Amino acid sequence: MEKKEQRVDRGTEQFSPKILVFACNWCSYAAADLAGVSRLEVPSDFRIIRVMCSARVRPEFVIYAFSRGFDGVFILGCHPGECHYSEGNYYTRRRVLLLKETLQFMGIESERFQLRWVSASEGAKFAGTMKRLIEGIRDLGPRNIDT
Amino acid sequence: MDNREKGVERKIITRDDLSKWLEKIKGHFDLYAPVRSTVVNFGKIERVDKICLDFMNTFLPPKVLFFPQTEELFSYARDSEGIEVKRAEDLIKERVLFGIRPCDARALSILDMVFGGEIQDSHYIEKRRNTVLIGIGCTESLNTCFCSTFGIDPLSGEGTDIFLIDNGGYFTIKEVNTQRGRSLIDLGNTFIKTEKVDHREEAGSVTVPINIASITGNMEKVQEDFWNNTSDPCLSCGICTYVCPTCHCFDVEDEEKKNGGVRFRTWDFCMSKDFARMASGENPRISKGERYRHRYFHKFDYFPKKYAVVGCVGCGRCISYCPVNMDIRKVLERIRENIQK
Amino acid sequence: MIKVMLQKKLQDRVKELLQNGTVSLFIGYEQGPGFVYVSPCFVRDESGAERLVLNQFCSNNLAGYIHEYNAYNRRIGICVKGCDARALVELVKQNQITREDLFVVGVPCTGRIDISKLREEYGPKLEEIKGISETERSFLLETVRGTKEIYKEKIVFDKCLSCTHPEGFEYDILLDELKIPEFGSADPVQKRVEEMESLSTAEKNEVWCSYLSQCILCRACQKACYACYCPECIFDKAYPRWFSKISTTAQKRLYHLIRAYHLAGRCVDCGECERACPAGIPLRLLNKKIEKETKKLFNNREAGINQEGVLPLNTFDIDDPDFFL
């Protein structure tokens, strides 16, 4: 029963979103590396923080990032069943599910916070995912920063 | 309510004219007055009809306008040439605070001793200097009020520039104490009339004073057990400190931004566990009883010893807002009993 | 009359418990600055038992004190109503105390009175109220100006309108049969959650900003909550500093968001946070939303109802939904 989200009229101004990406060391960070080595085109609006497992990402990291002005926060992890530490990404999935709803409820669009599975060999998927997600953040527009 | 019998000549202003006077004041100054949302607080007035006069006292005391909860002290930025430090702007537009109660006016004079005494705090002083106080007397009181304990007269405008008394259909201008007050009265001279009225001098509110004789200087006699047992229900939250008009402890921190930052001060509360914790990890007030004891000592022993006045004005906010209904009056009574034993 | 008997019964039992050394500390309620204002009461010897009261104003959740007094007292006696017992269930589940270290006295409850609602119905001079009794549907307030009757529904807490008790909880003493009171209307908080969900993001922001603008970060919600027992709270940590003391709307939102998230699956909806808040912020709204989501997403039963089970965020299911991908 959500009201349709207002899309920002970008007009001619190019909005460069500030995006933070948590990438797990064994899968998604390797995929990012692979995308780079393969000279795939990836937008440059994001900064990566490498974590050993996507489960390392505490909800505080995400909320803190939003409070500091990031327009989008993404977590990239291993596919379910392929976590280097067997189960980490299952916990991540639960946390993200709940955190998305909570953020949405408090006025931060849940589309700004995303979780994707990217394995180490999926360089192209990394590039494509980042392109699509960042496009989505551009559509949403800059966050309504409260000071 | 309009009891204009034979009586004394007084300057009065009707309720409607009061709005017009305040509107005129708003044209020259920033106007701050009580506004109601979920609670009543002092707020900057854009529209005079938003002012709430149906209140006993505000949630946050007037100290919030002179000693804000967060205040920038200075900012620093690094550029190619070095580091630039910029002091925060102290200058503020002249403003009028309307609706301050006698207890809060006394509290401001207590804060003046802290922020304007040996050490001159320019942030506070500048705001204080640029604010005109229009007080309203208390013709009623809450049953948590005990200002009479400290010699505060609910119908006296001590510490204010102008002092009004609400008589229902009209306000009596009981006192005009300063030059600034007089110039505001001049601003309203088309609205202020002089009439013979019988205003409620006699029917001021009566608050029950508590006996705090001989507490200062004798509190060391109270046993440690007393503090531990009395403080049992305390949650160690910060409500009593934040709503107290005389509490003034603050923390200073830096907020880092890219290539620089801001140093700010912010309210702090001594009831929190880490308040007295030192960088080494030592904590001289690690137990709740010690922290509770400290609060009472600060207000009723250390402060009067240094400034010759007790650090409490009897506004009763700490009693009203405490989540577990602790009562400073009861504790003081029991302290007195304990000392006399 | 029944209430007076129960109060006497409680006092006598507590005296016994202290006399024979079953408990070294009993946590109950005593009268505060006025009949309608009660404070938690800590009784350590028999003479103190006379201070205990039991009436429709005893609303505090005393379970919040357990972790503070746990280290130095064996056993701790505590009197709880049905909703508070949920907090005890959770404390045991979360390994904060063993059931054997608690001596639980169950207290019957037909709804506790919300002082702010009472102020609206009765008027500001609550000091006039000197006594209370009740009928099936109303409270009869004995005041200096005579008896005033008010429908229970109008002045009980919102949470009381949809009362829930933990299942199969064994009280060591049950003062009287525990019944779940029935009221004509339901707790409005669920509807408010749905209303909030239906707003657009910009509108939600506006609403939360207006609520949060009143917040003074006094931390009373945290201290009143039974579940906030971390020895070093994340908001007090200096390194890494997640929470800056700069009192801006962004920090207030961060505070409430993180705290509510930390309570996911543990909040028993005792309402203490909202009751303790001096600025009237509707904190139950956020906690209720999280409760709704954990129920929907993880099949998690309400916290405090079941004595078995794992916290929802401490576990996972291979088949957890991932519709967001």
Image (tube, rainbow, N blue to C red):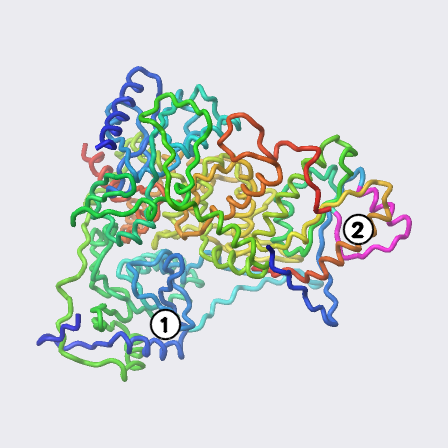
Q: Residues within 10 Å of mark 1 (few under 14, many from 20)?
A: few
Determine whether B7 is above or below C268 in the image: below
Q: Is residue A98 left or right of residue B166?
A: right
What residue is shown with label 1? B49
Return the x and y of residue B120 as percentages of the image width and height: 41, 60
Callout 1: chain: B
* Residue linked to disc 2: A129
* Residue at the bottom extreme of this rendering: B190
Quarter of the figure with residue B29 = bottom left
Q: Position of residue C145 (x, y in %)?
A: 16, 50
Disc 2: host chain: A
What kind of residue is marked 2? Thr
Q: Quadrant of residue B66?
A: bottom left
Which residue range is magenta in the image?
A28-48
Q: Residue at x 36, y 24 (%)?
A: C77
Q: Is residue A38 magenta?
A: yes
Q: Is residue C226 magenta?
A: no
Q: Is A108 or C9 nearer to us in this picture? A: C9
Using the image, determine if residue C28 lies above or below residue B128: above
A118 relative to B109 in the view: left or right: right
